[in-house]
Amino acid sequence: MIKHFFFFLVISLTLCACSTTPPKKPKDLCEIFKEKSSWYDDAQDVYAKRGVPINIVMSFMYHESGYVDDAQPPMRWFLFIPYGRGSSAYGYAQAQDPVWDDYVSEAGGFFSSRDDFADSLDFISWYILKTNKVNKVKITDVYNQYLNYHEGWGGYRKKTHAKNKSLQQLARKVETTAGNYAKQLRNCDL
């Protein structure tokens, strides 16, 4: 009995220790990478592997999860009874189950995890490259790339975003963040 208690205590402490806090200055890419140097290494590795600019991938992640490793949509409630979340989106990239499964089978690996920073960067880069192939959106067209990311490839083709002004505004914010991150990254002393 005592053995089991200590086993679960060690597991619980280990799981709690794995959680990563978001950066203190999420709007400044240089400060993010100075605070979390391993993130810079991961971003460089993913850029070398896929060629998607770091500023774009990081802007998607910032607006999707705020750099929270275990981010999820809020729980929905009926009176005081929880009845599930709005979607299966999870982790840094807010990847939903079906598209994450596609990524794992096509480009990720069995041990890929949505709450792993490097895996999430790789997923976003993979998605952007696939959007380029599927819907012919330039990799550097942040606005339309983000609309694809948010609505899915089929939703984008059906123009589900056309009447969604708040989504269009969000896509413009992601585009602005990517531009700011690019300027900051050019002047970083890393």
Image (tube, grey):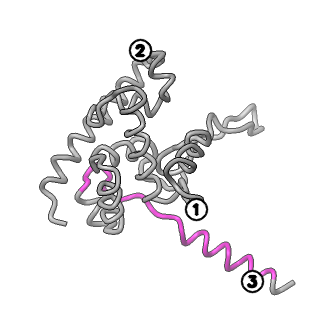
Q: Residue at x 20, y 46 (%)?
A: 182
Can residue 30 be found in the magenta stretch? no
Q: Where's residue 19, x and y in %?
A: 52, 65
In primary-sequence order, the first of circles 1 and 3 is 3
In primary-sequence order, the first of circles 3 and 2 is 3
Q: Main secondary structure of the magenta part?
A: helix
Q: Residue at x 45, y 22 (%)?
A: 156
**Dot 3 amino acid type:** Phe
The residue labelled by disc 1 is 111
**Above or below for 75 versus 1:** above
Whole-number angstrom distance, CA of label 3 to CA of label 2: 55 Å
Magenta span covers which residues?
A: 4-29
Can residue 10 be found in the magenta stretch? yes
In primary-sequence order, the first of circles 2 and 1 is 1
**Above or below for 127 versus 188:** above
**Dot 2 amino acid type:** Ala
The residue labelled by disc 2 is 162
Q: Where's residue 123, x and y in %?
A: 46, 48
